[in-house]
């Protein structure tokens, strides 16, 4: 039971989701470091494999701002995991293509991500797992599908790779 529940406080959804997100991000960062990839790079490569997406489309799918996407793609190109090529339909756009080395890296990372996810979800009773993930998907598809505008804009938490 969390200190929040012990104190009898009102449900703090932001706190709970934030703590869960941080713990999951940290675990994935640590586990994926073993194969030399970050969760962000994995997300970009995995989604790039699904179709002919431009940098901008891929940034939107992965929830990244344009600057972060450019930096990420620069790193992926340097490591030989992806390349940008001109779009055949829009000369200003670049399509992100995953290299053979990138495909191997994604396959290895996918197995790690699946293992971590299964391990975490196994903590819940079987009947609650489906309800939990379905509920999160529904919230993100409906009520939380697009953030409310505010000034200044809320920045997403940055996942930092540990040097340890």
Image (tube, rainbow, N blue to C red):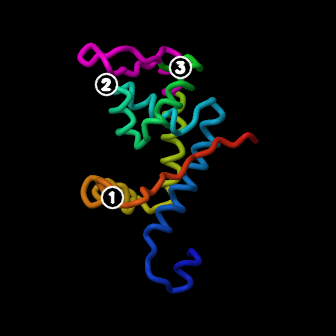
Pick the front one: 102 or 108: 102
Location of mark 2 (residue): 51
Which quadrant holds residue 98? Answer: top left
Residue at image position (23%, 17%) is 89
Mark 1 → mark 3, Cα distance in angstroms = 33 Å
Q: Helix or strand or loop: what does disc 1 sit on?
A: loop
Residue 134 visible to the viewer: no
For residue 96: magenta? yes
Mark 2 → mark 1, Cα distance in angstroms = 30 Å
Q: Position of residue 149 (x, y in %)?
A: 33, 58
Total marks placed: 3
Location of mark 1 (residue): 149
Quarter of the C terminus within the rendering:
top right
Mark 3 vs mark 2, foreground winner is 3
The magenta stretch spans which residues? 83-107
Quarter of the N terminus within the rendering:
bottom right
- Residue 77 disc label: 3
Q: Position of residue 39 (x, y in %)?
A: 53, 39
Q: Is residue 61 above or below residue 23?
A: above
Residue at image position (29%, 54%) is 145
């Amino acid at each position: 039971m969390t200190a929040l529940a012990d104190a009898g406080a009102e449900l703090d959804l932001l706190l709970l989701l934030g703590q869960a997100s941080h713990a999951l991000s940290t675990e994935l960062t640590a586990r994926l470091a073993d194969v030399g990839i970050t969760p962000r790079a994995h997300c970009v490569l995995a989604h790039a494999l699904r179709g002919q997406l431009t940098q901008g489309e891929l940034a939107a799918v992965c929830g990244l701002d344009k600057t972060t996407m450019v930096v990420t793609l620069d790193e992926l190109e340097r490591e030989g995991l992806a390349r940008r090529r001109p779009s055949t339909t829009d000369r200003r756009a670049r399509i992100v293509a995953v290299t053979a080395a990138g495909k191997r890296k994604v396959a290895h990372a996918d197995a790690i991500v699946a293992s971590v996810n299964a391990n975490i979800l196994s903590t819940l009773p079987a009947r609650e797992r489906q309800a939990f993930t379905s509920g999160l998907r529904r919230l993100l598809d409906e009520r939380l599908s697009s953030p409310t505008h505010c000034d200044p804009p809320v920045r997403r938490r940055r996942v930092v790779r540990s040097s340890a």
